[in-house]
Amino acid sequence: MSTPAHALASAVRKQEQGLLNCVHCGFCLPACPTYRRLGDEADSPRGRLYLMQAVVEGRLDPGAEAFQTHIGRCLGCRACEPVCPSGVEYGHLLELARQVGGNARRPPFLARMLLRVFGTAWLARPAMFAGRAMRATGLPTLLTRILAGRRPPKGARLAVAMLAASAPPPPLPGRTEGRPATVPQRETGDKPTVGVLAGCVQAGLFGRVNQATVRVLQANGYRVVSVPNQGCCGALHAHGGDLETARSLARRNLEAFEAAGVDFVAMNASGCGAAMADYGSLLADDEELAPRARALAGKIRDISQLLAERGPVPGGTVPLKVTYDAPCHLLHAQGVAEPPARVLDSIPGLEVVPLPGAAECCGGAGIYGLTNPRLGGWIGSDKVQSVLGTGAAALITGNPGCMMQIGAGLALTGAGIPVLHLVELLDESYRRGGLYGEVDR
Amino acid sequence: MVPVTLAKSLVEICGRDGVILDEERLLVYESDALTAYRHRPGAVVLPRSTDQVQGAVRAIAEHGLPIVPRGAGTGLSGGAVALDGAVVIGTARMNRILDIDAPNRRAVLQPGVINAELSVAAGAHGLYYAPDPSSQTACTIGGNVAENSGGPHCLKYGVTSRYVTGLAVVLADGSMVRLGGQGRESPGYDLVGLFVGSEGCFGIATEIEVGLLPVPEGVCTLLGIFDRIDDAGQAVSDIVGAGLLPAALEIIDGPTIRAVEDSVFAAGYPIDAEAALVIEFDGMEAGLEHDAERAAALCALAGAREVRTARDEDERMALWKGRKKAFGAMGRIAPDLLVQDATVPRTTLPSILRGISDIGQRYDLVVANVFHAGDGNLHPNILFDRRDEHELERVERASKEIMQLCVDSGGTITGEHGVGLDKKHHMDLIYGPDELDAMWQVRRVFDPGGVMNPGKVLPEDTGPAEGAGLPEGIGGD
Amino acid sequence: MIDAGVARAGDAEGPAVVYPASVEEAAEVIRAANRTGTRLIPAGLGSWLGAGGWTGPADVIVSCERLNAVQHYEPADLTMTAGAGLGMAELDDVLRPNGQWLPVDAPGVGAGTVGGMVACGVSGALQGRYGAVRDNVLGVDVVTGAGRVLRIGGRVVKNVAGYDLVRLFTGSRGSLGIITSVSVRLFPRPEADVTLCYGGGTTEIVALARTMCTSPLPIAAVEVEAGGENGETVMVRLLGSVGEVEEVLSRLVDSVGPKPRAIVRGDESAALHRDRGAWEEGSALVVRLAALPDRLADTFGRGAALAGALGGEIAADAMSGVVRVKASPDAGRDGDVVRELSRAREEMEAAGGTMTLSQARGEVAARVGWTGGRGSDGGLGTRIKELFDPASILAARCP
């Protein structure tokens, strides 16, 4: 186990190589949600890289307010990466910067506690249970209705609304069509084997999404196997700069998925997907684990990719006007843009309207709402306004964090627009189309 | 650090979140996109309105501190670098499009509007904003006005000054003047044209009126691949000489091709080529094919290995993306780069390119060329590592020699990036003492106290002599 | 007093004319004038003598007639440098064999000089397509009113080295200095030149002109003429490759507006527009009204009223929203003319527009002012005038 001093030195070394690629062209500025709103160079990717460089050069103390504030204010949405002509790996540098910053000054208590809960199974399970129990009382939904208004969502209001937003959506319009004359069957030859990452929030609050994921995969000719002993992906820890915990969580998942012998790992939480696709880099310093981590990272697929690969097979009609918001960790971090559109296009009766600013972060960004309530609320309410402007009856996305963030924002406007995961919608289409072999499950 | 009294008034004017005073937070404002110069400002203010700009300018001027206007900091001549603890006035928060007046094909904007976003907004009316500097996805209109920015398409459409029709300008004493506006016709001296390209030395434009053009019906893009860069230069001369008027003619040389292809913007250029020539025609579909065929034939005649035609919008965009992001992609070859911006008469391109290559070899430096060939506007990028002091010195000497070479051929030291801090000591390559003196005096008309962006554009040793309006011995009676 | 040729213009009472043959000689003239307090009027061929400068009697006309050499012309560079006294017609003769032109259709273009075109800075109807005069001037050599020789700008198409003083001298109406040499940007002469002519009542043709202006089709110019021998006419000019022009032509005829009265091609089309340019020639009073293009009907109406009062004709560049009024030689007594002009200016300015005098006799210009209200520049123009012409030998004030 490396000492903090050793980690710092190595982080600095890595930063220097990555940072020198930045030619200071400024192309990243307009892509950054915080710069767009604050207009301060220090809140832009280029500015943050400059601060990192100053730390490397010894001109700035990582404990300094400037470093802590502006590195802390980054959403980690990585929208700056696709527009960078020099290929600066901002996401990695940010994690290292947060580690350096965290070593210099302890992160806030609440943030540390939350990360602790996610990373520790015996803490996470009761917390999620409590959340579900609370949600089941209907109290959050009621409170959200009472608290609805024009103010930006933040603080306790946001927390309550987020919990309410994780509840199953109301029934969608249209009706079940019954079983088709012939259920489309995928060729039964070599079915690829898929393991599904259950995830923490996903498993805790969005069990229905995990179940739908399994069903739609099977309907598209995948063999889904269970993967025992898997756990948290470590994304939030890595983003927060707690790379040590992130690595130990990665090791556990690496062993679990290797043991299951899967061809692909299906991800229905894009934050987790981006983190696992990055295991190769995370464990790069471990000679024994690095090649294995790279092999596993090569098997990571977003659920939309696996579905689009197979068509996906069409289901029943869902007569609904929807709009799609691209999760940052799907679009920017993994570069997955087309597959979700193909899945949506495959659903009969669905009208998809473009969402202005779909590529911009919703302000959820892990625990951002907690660490930067004001700015997070501002970014979140812009997203909500954009959704309302489309006139869509539902918002579709692919990450639980985004679902809760945008769902909470929408709920607080009282507009009654639900947020659905992409697979929930496809699952409903399949159910209506009778692909699961029965009219009512 | 600025005086406490100034800090207090700035906070009163722009709000606590509109003023940056903390030394460490000011670090990031040391440079613009030319990182060779680093100077930390005394403070940064981020006003939201013309009123706030006026208030801030007055307060700063009262304290005798200099002012540096800054847009997105994408400039390549060090124009937004704050010398002597100057206070930076950033326009990032003044980013509203105030009006798109489609029937009159014009728009009124705040200076912080991003160039490309204006075209997106105007697109809803079938219009666009023609000047398209390579940094158009990031740079602001205010910065474009200050630098009189060009771009690949100004071969056919002209540079920023052709499109700016009106300005509200806050002068160094905090007063606001309105120049031009309400369309192209404006009586009296062309003060709008004079202000455009004044690099922040005349004042801060807080409201900008620009002309828009209808989006052309069709676009056709060609790519000529050459084994010799001279041949590509010849093809450019031949195409223009034949009476064709492409919307753009761009050359990307071998080292740049390889940098781009290695970046996330790989455009599919063959990596063993020594030059790629991008030719674009726009207009009615009916005329495009004919023009494109003629251009392709001229490329072949000049020795092109192959000529490709972008078959759809995706291919076209990829092709342009590679060209437009070339500057950033250079970061992959070396940690630092110095971009030159000389313009030469088009017909001298082949000999100038050979000359630049010779200079690079003589100083043992990698020089990558990517430039607006149709305008004769060169962008030799000298790649280096600032941590090597000897190399830095060679870069400076090579840089000056390249400029001299271009000036000798009838060209100028900067075509679109501006003089800024970087080239002010080369101004005497093209202007004599009388011209420089006239420029000093015009600058003093706008800014008698020398408050606005001091230390830029004009070399100090050519400073205005007292009463220099008349040559010695002559006085009006 | 100086070596340059001196002659009397007209009768012996008129001002003397000097003909400097080099920039140095022109500088000598100006320095001498500074010493003696002589009032000068710079001129090309004298076709726009009533376009600026002294409104009262001047002492000496400085003619650039002898400064008429083509100094540099490399066709493939699409640029040219020439002495200010080179006639626009002679310039065109040089460019034509190379398939090039200078698409600046400044009014009076047939007779004027390159220097006069730059000094007046008035643009014709092609400005929408090719840019205004100021957009196509790359550099000038000038002798300032203080007698300094400045070589500003250059002969390359993109140049941002230093402040753009070229813009300042372009359209300065001789009030800052004498332009002795000009570098301009050239264009390939278009393959096809076609003009569609439409007739109709005033309301109809103004509306049609606006329709043409807002069409996304590449139209080079839209001009409207009224009160002349051709009656009310809209002329829509198309320039470009044969393929493009024919396509636009067929779309215009098929789907935009009524059937054209005539379609004129090639040299005939070019000649038609040369006539529009020469339209101002010989008139002692030409007024230019301008407002945003979508106010064309109002501006045209205002111009028609003025033309009625002055017994003149009107012509409009619809794309720029400019309406020119040419008064008849017997426009009336000066007092009446001044009153009409002042009212037109007031009304135009109240509506956010402008009224300038393109040509006027000194007496009228002195009372009306060349350009009118310019209250918002904070005195910048005046200070610039004082800077370059401190002894006021070129003009009393900035135009």
Image (spheres, rainbow, N blue to C red):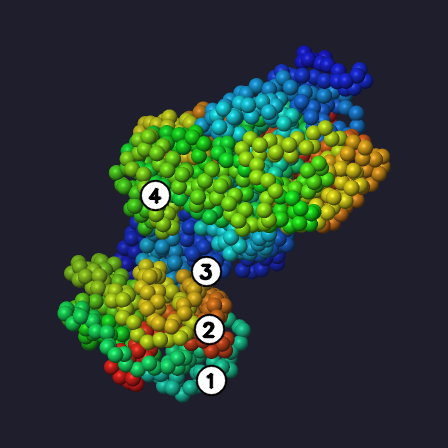
What label does residue A409 carry, if any?
Answer: 2
In the displayed structure image, the side of residue B201 where residue A433 appears, left or right: left
Q: Foreground: C24 or B61?
A: C24
Question: What amino acid is at disc 2?
Answer: Gly
Distance (Cα) linking label 2 and label 4: 48 Å
- Find residue A352 and report its horizontal and vertical position in percent: 41, 68
Question: What amino acid is at disc 4?
Answer: Thr
Identify the residue position indicated by label 3 in the image.
Answer: A34
Distance (Cα) linking label 2 and label 1: 15 Å
**Mark 4 chain:** B
Identify the residue position indicated by label 1 in the image.
Answer: A142
- Find residue C86 and report its horizontal and vertical position in percent: 60, 22
- Is residue C358 placed above or below C247 in the rendered structure? above
Distance (Cα) linking label 2 and label 3: 18 Å
Identify the residue position indicated by label 4 in the image.
Answer: B309
- Is residue C383 placed above or below B264 in the rendered structure? above
